[in-house]
Image (spheres, rainbow, N blue to C red):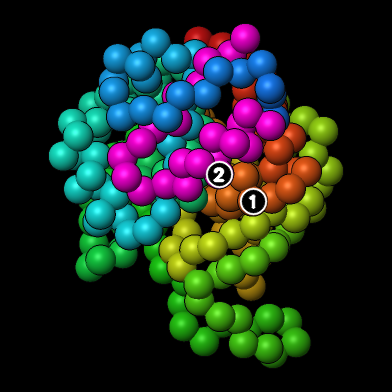
Amino acid sequence: MSTVAVIDYGMGNLHSISKALQHADPKARVEVTSDPGQMRAAERIVFPGVGAIRDCMAALHGLGLEPVLHELAAAKPFLGICLGMQALLEDSEENDGVACLGLLPGRVKRFGDGLADTEGRTLKIPHMGWNQVHPTGPHPLWEGIPQDSRFYFVHSYYASPANPAHVAATADYPTPFAAALARGKVFAVQFHPEKSQAAGLRLLANFLHWNPGD
């Protein structure tokens, strides 16, 4: 039985992600917690997030979780979701510039104005709705998920990692951006797997059975 800690810092779809994890593996023990001791005791970590990066970082700082997240990401399987992915980078353009956790080199940028698709139709910001995701190569979390499967996105900013090797998948809006990042025990996605039906549940199930090496 896998134990997974969903980090509660006041900025995540905690009920939805917890319910989805439980559905993905009914045998898993899912704990929503802001207690570092419970996080350290869990076998896996999920770091969700919605809202503004400034509020996210302020909440993490207020709870003293920044060093704990660095520790956990190095020690055990760690899944960042949406804002939880963006917070892993070094800084974000949002809110006039915010320093982030720096677990992955790179920064978070805003989609530009005046975006249009190949037929000239205006693309709205935020990028909201279903979009195809293109894994850049094999990874245990993509097992059983067909190339170009659709996942659900809601975001106005996107990750721009310094090392292209950390990009685990891309999506187009209208040009490619990083839809997933991976390094070591960390895997992070810009989309919401808990809102992405069968493909999202499969990704969560894969995470709950993922055992990355040291």
Visible in this render: residue 212? no
Residue 180 vertical position relative to residue 142 in the rendered view, above or below: below
Q: SS for tag 1?
A: helix
Up/down of 10 relative to 212, above or below:
below
Q: Which residue is drawn at 25% across and 54% down?
A: 55
Question: Tag 2, which secondary structure?
Answer: helix
Q: Can you give x and y, in whole percent of width and height, for residue 40 in the image?
A: 36, 14
Q: Is residue 8 magenta?
A: yes
Q: Residues within 10 Å of mark 1 (few under 14, many from 20)?
A: some
| Residue range corresponding to the magenta coloring | 1-23
Q: Which residue is under mark 1?
A: 195
Q: Is any part of residue 53 visible from this angle? A: yes
Asked if residue 150 is among those painted magenta in the image, a careful observer would answer no
The amino acid at mark 1 is Lys
N-term-proximal mark, 1 vs 2: 2
Q: Name the residue under label 2.
A: 16
Are the residues at dot 1 and dot 2 in contact (C-beta closer than 8 Å)? yes
Near-viewer residue (76 or 30): 30
| 162 sits to left or right of 23 | left
Amino acid carrying mark 2 in the image: Ser
Measured Cα–Cα span from mark 1 to mark 2: 8 Å
Residue 145's tag is none
In the rendered image, residue 92, in percent from the top left (x then y), is placed at 32, 57
Residue at horizontal 30 percent and vertical 29 percent from the top:
34
Image position of 121 with respect to 37: above or below: below
Residue occupying image coordinates x 63% and y 28%? 22
- Quick check: 195 left or right of 197? left
